[in-house]
Image (tube, helix red, strand yellow):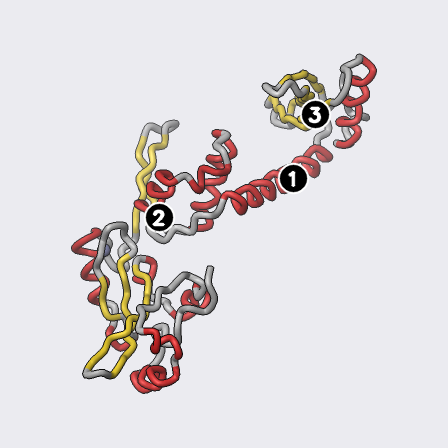
């Protein structure tokens, strides 16, 4: 992302006077270009733009020339793919034009509480609940899908998958593959920590099974699964170890690796062989 290319044309709060001052002081104006907001001013914008309308429009400065004088105008461009609508976005212009466009072109109504309908299969009824879009909640759900369905981390960069997400929410903050991987590793470590803490509270004894697995690259892995019955008498199982075993798989080596896992999880004393 490039430097501070967002200009000083004012993000919603500048008055007419300060905008005219900018005409003379802003070096970008000499280049006669439309300033493209590259998103680096995200923090600045989210602070100042309080209207919900800015979820759907991106503000960009535009330079216009009138009788040889150059002026900066702030315009808001619709985020919906293939929609070319744009409106003046100086703060005194108000947001009703933006809302009118959202209503007529995209069926989005100002101040409308969204509802979501969900089937409750146990009760056989449909439950209607208020729905609020929260990008962080949605991102967590995306990560959960990657984890549970074993999608590659690179799915977040797959062209048509990104198109799909953008069609639902044009400004959804989808992450890079590197960030997605890091975030998911953090979820893993967090869950692992929670399991550590939980297992310390379990009073019953544990049973564990061990299995060897060979990958396509001919590497051998040991998988250790822990089984127990919780206080509500439900059978529980968790994988507590999945790691590469080097060298020959002698009985001694396998048993040593297995015992190491139990010790790592502090369950060797409660182990029920
Ligand atoms: Zn539009």
The residue under label 3 is: 244
Mark 3 or 2: in front is 3
Q: Position of residue 113 (x, y in %)?
A: 30, 53
The image's mark for residue 194 is 1
In the image, taking residue 107 as reference, residue 152 lies left or right, namely right
What is the CA distance from the residue labelled 1 to the residue labelled 3? 24 Å
Q: Position of residue 216 (x, y in %)?
A: 59, 19
What is the CA distance from the residue labelled 3 to the residue labelled 2? 45 Å
The image's mark for residue 131 is 2
Q: Mark 1 near mark 3, Cβ–Cβ under 8 Å?
A: no
**Ligand 1 image position (quadrant):** bottom left
Q: Quadrant of residue 97?
A: bottom left
Q: Position of residue 199 (x, y in %)?
A: 70, 33
| Dot 1 or dot 3, earlier in sequence | 1
Q: Relative to 158, say whether 234 is above or below.
A: above
Circle 3 — which element?
Answer: strand
Q: Relative to 141, say whether 232 is above or below.
A: above
Picture mark count: 3
């Amino acid at each position: 992302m490039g430097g501070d290319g967002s200009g000083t044309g004012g993000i919603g709060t500048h008055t007419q006077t300060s905008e005219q001052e900018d005409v003379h002081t802003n070096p970008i104006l000499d280049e006669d270009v439309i300033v493209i907001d590259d998103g680096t001013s995200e923090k600045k914008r989210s602070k100042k733009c309080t209207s919900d309308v800015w979820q759907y429009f991106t503000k960009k400065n535009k330079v216009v020339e009138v009788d040889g004088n150059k002026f900066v105008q702030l315009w808001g461009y619709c985020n919906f793919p293939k929609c070319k609508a744009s409106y003046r976005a100086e703060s005194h212009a108000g947001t009703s034009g933006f809302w009118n466009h959202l209503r007529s072109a995209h069926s989005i109504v100002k101040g409308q509480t969204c509802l979501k309908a969900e089937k409750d299969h146990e009760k056989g009824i449909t439950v209607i609940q208020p729905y609020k879009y929260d990008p962080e909640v949605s991102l967590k759900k995306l990560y959960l899908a990657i984890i549970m369905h074993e999608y590659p981390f690179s799915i977040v960069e797959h062209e048509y998958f990104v198109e799909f997400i953008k069609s639902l929410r044009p400004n959804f903050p989808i992450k890079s593959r590197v960030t997605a991987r890091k975030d998911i590793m953090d979820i893993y470590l967090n869950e692992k920590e929670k399991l550590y803490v939980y297992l310390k509270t379990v009073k019953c004894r544990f049973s564990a099974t061990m299995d060897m697995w060979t990958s396509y690259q001919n590497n051998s892995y040991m998988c250790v699964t822990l089984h127990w019955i919780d206080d509500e008498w439900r059978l529980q199982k968790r994988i507590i170890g999945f790691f590469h075993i080097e060298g020959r798989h002698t009985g001694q080596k396998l048993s040593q690796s297995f015992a190491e896992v139990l010790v790592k999880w502090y369950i060797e004393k409660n182990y029920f062989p």
